[in-house]
Amino acid sequence: MIKVGVAREIITPQVGGYLFGYNNHTQSTSVHDDLTVTALLLQSENTSAMLVSATVCLIHDSLVAQMRNKIQEATGVPAQNIIISATHTHSGPPTTAFSRFDTFGTIDWDYCNNIFIPQTVKAAVAAAASLQPAKMGVGTTHSLAGINRRQLLPDNSVVLGQNPWDHYDPTMTVISFVGDKNRKTIANIIHIGAHCTASGNNTEITRDWAGVMADRLETESGGMSLFVNGTLGDVAPRMANGDSIGDIKHAMEVGGLAGIDAVRAYKTIRTFYDEPLQVVCGGLKLPYNPPIAREDIPIMLEKCGEWDTFQRASLQCLAEMYKSEDMGEDHWEYEQNILRIGPVVLVPYPFEVCSEIGLRLRSYSPYAHTLTLSCTNGSHSYLPAESQICRGGYEIKSFLWFRPRQLPDDADKQLVEQNLELIRRFT
């Protein structure tokens, strides 16, 4: 009932370019491990879909659109059925930018046009050429690869660190595809949520801990393994230093432990079965809050702290909108594409989704393995749970001030509800 094809290409940038994730002036000095893009093509009767996993930090909306169109031209897979996900390593080239705010530099278009886009298309074409009948199995395990990173201080303020008593999603899921006849592993999808920041603000190009994990599962299973990051918004890699960042040694340690978990999840799979592929698409819509009053903008700008770059830039942009008398739309919307194979449902979000949201979505969904994919099909900063907004912190400021018009505090609830409506369309 299903055919699977998979292929991979190297997308490592030249040494000396800027790395994206912490600031706009860190340059790479070496390659610790190659960055890759892996394309997984799924086909069932008259439906085809592709999952692309790229080991970069974030992928700008415009890049996603370009890649989808080029993959459609090259393979025939409908653009709306293509999911493009970033693993969120903070040790790769700039493939997105918050250009309106001028805080994180700009997209490296030379890299994107000469390496990232063409290599992605090349992987997609090779995946299409390798299609073969397959069966699917699913395994899960409890993993300690991640830990909540919204560390609560005695004064009730939130900083980036480790918070052992708050939310994270401990379920690691491995979806494995094997040949219909020979039962040899063709490909694996690994899903777990945690920032790929174990390497810290280093100068080595690296896939971070997730690369070590994927390599280990490939070695043990014999099948190409790709990683899609889950609800990472408030989750750090669990490191011995008690922080949310470390160095390259920390990345190797976390990756080694996560690799053991991935292999354990893979080995729990006892049954491989035929399942058809389904894709459902639809528009998701969030209303903006009423704009901040024009007269309040100068007062708020004066109160901005040294590090409130998002807030300052957002307020300045809003002032310009008032000046031009063009306040834009009263809502924000985007096109969603959700993929289902049997009990597995992949739900993309163009946000860094906080863990409570993914846990709720899975709990409410009629499908056992409903997996939230962060940093997928675009790049729109953080999506916190409404319960987190009152305490503030880095993720909250980013959510509130990523755009001049603010999304509502209950954006998480609205998106969960709208995604569930789409999920219920599956038959």
Image (tube, rainbow, N blue to C red):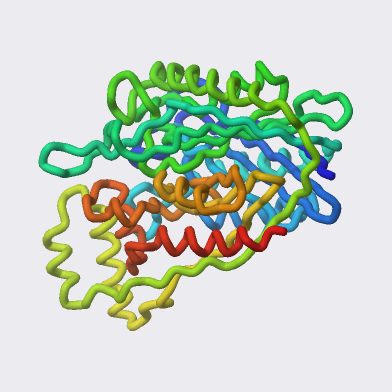
Q: How many marks?
A: 0
Residue 205 in view of the camera: no
Pick the front one: 121 or 191 = 191
* Left or right relative to 68: residue 169: left
Q: Residue at x 66, y 42 (%)?
A: 120
Q: Is residue 51 above or below residue 201?
A: below
Q: Is residue 95 above or below residue 153?
A: below
Pick the front one: 376 or 286 = 286
Which quadrant: the N terminus?
A: top right
Pick the front one: 378 or 263 = 263
The quadrant holding residue 11 is: top right
Q: Residue at x 36, y 42 (%)?
A: 234
Which quadrant: the C terminus?
A: bottom right
* Left or right relative to 389: residue 232: right
Image coordinates of residue 287 in percent, x first then y, are: 41, 72
Image coordinates of residue 105 in percent, x first then y, are: 38, 48
Q: Residue at x 59, y 25 (%)?
A: 265
* Left or right relative to 130: residue 37: left
* Left or right relative to 149: residue 109: right
Residue 372 in view of the camera: yes
Q: Residue at x 30, y 76 (%)?
A: 290
Residue, far bottom: 325
Image coordinates of residue 13 in percent, x first then y, are: 54, 33
Pick the front one: 135 or 252 = 135
Image coordinates of residue 175 in percent, x first then y, are: 66, 34
The quadrant holding residue 245 is: top left
